[in-house]
């Protein structure tokens, strides 16, 4: 890929420090849970990155819960690149991979419901996803005062080849 273009790709191990920088910036603002460098390395195959001019400028990850249910998480774009459609490209890439895997429902926990509404998600009750509550939320400092909004999207199973 030419270096002067924006593209979204699977993350590589060498991207872990950049992913850590981006997600730490969001965690410091209280927008997402902090992830350790070790956690990012362990989960690198679940990450996608947006690259522009040879620099990783955004990321997101997927997490599988059942054969039909997955989450898009850790969606973050460096502030200087926000509002340029990069988040949308990352979500579209994640959804494409989830469709290929046969996943029919994808959810997010977010503070930015407007963004996810624009890409086809709708609000739901958090209790819809008990697996999520027990996997990550028990370690969250906001557990008893969660301000995140649960949103879901049904994925069509038509894959363009």
Image (tube, rainbow, N blue to C red):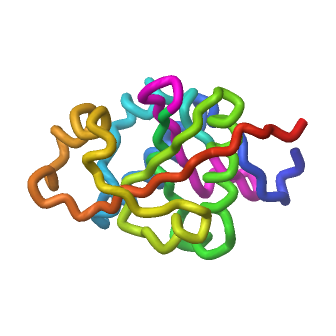
Give the x, y percent position of residue 102.
Answer: 64, 28
> Would residue 11 be found to the left or right of residue 136 on screen?
right
Q: Which residues are magenta?
A: 49-68
Give the x, y percent position of residue 140.
Answer: 19, 46
Residue at (90% x, 36% y) in the render: 161
* Image height of 108 relative to 94, above or below: below
> Would residue 19 be found to the left or right of residue 156 on screen?
left
Question: Magenta includes 87?
Answer: no
Could you tell me what secondary structure mostly forms the magenta stretch? Answer: strand
Q: How many marks?
A: 0
Residue at (59% x, 33% y) in the render: 103
* Image height of 79 relative to 7, above or below: below
Q: Quadrant of the N terminus?
A: top right
Residue at (63% x, 45% y) in the render: 155
Instruction: Single out the residue that lies furthest toward the left.
Output: 144
Residue at (28% x, 51% y) in the render: 126
Q: Quadrant of residue 58?
A: bottom right
Give the x, y percent position of residue 101.
Answer: 65, 27
> Would residue 80 be found to the left or right of residue 131 on screen?
right
Q: Nearer the viewer, residue 24 or 128?
A: 128
> Would residue 123 be found to the left or right of residue 55 on screen?
left
Q: Nearer the viewer, residue 78 or 105?
A: 105
* Image height of 34 relative to 115, above or below: above
* Image height of 56 relative to 85, above or below: above
Q: Nearer the viewer, residue 90 or 101?
A: 101
């Amino acid at each position: 890929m030419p270096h002067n273009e924006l593209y979204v790709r699977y993350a590589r191990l060498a991207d872990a420090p950049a992913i850590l920088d981006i997600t730490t910036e969001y965690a410091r603002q209280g927008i997402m849970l902090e992830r350790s460098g070790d956690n990012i390395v362990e989960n690198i195959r679940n990450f996608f990155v947006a690259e522009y001019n040879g620099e990783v400028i955004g990321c997101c990850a997927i997490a599988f819960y059942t054969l039909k249910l997955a989450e898009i998480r850790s969606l973050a774009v460096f502030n200087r690149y926000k509002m340029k459609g990069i988040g949308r490209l990352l979500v579209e890439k994640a959804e494409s991979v989830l469709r290929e895997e046969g996943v029919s429902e994808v959810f997010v926990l977010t503070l930015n419901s407007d963004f996810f509404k624009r890409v086809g998600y709708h609000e739901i009750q958090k209790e819809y996803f008990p697996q999520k509550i027990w996997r990550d939320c028990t370690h969250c400092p906001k557990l008893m005062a969660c301000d995140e909004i649960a949103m879901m999207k049904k994925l069509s199973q038509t894959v363009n080849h």
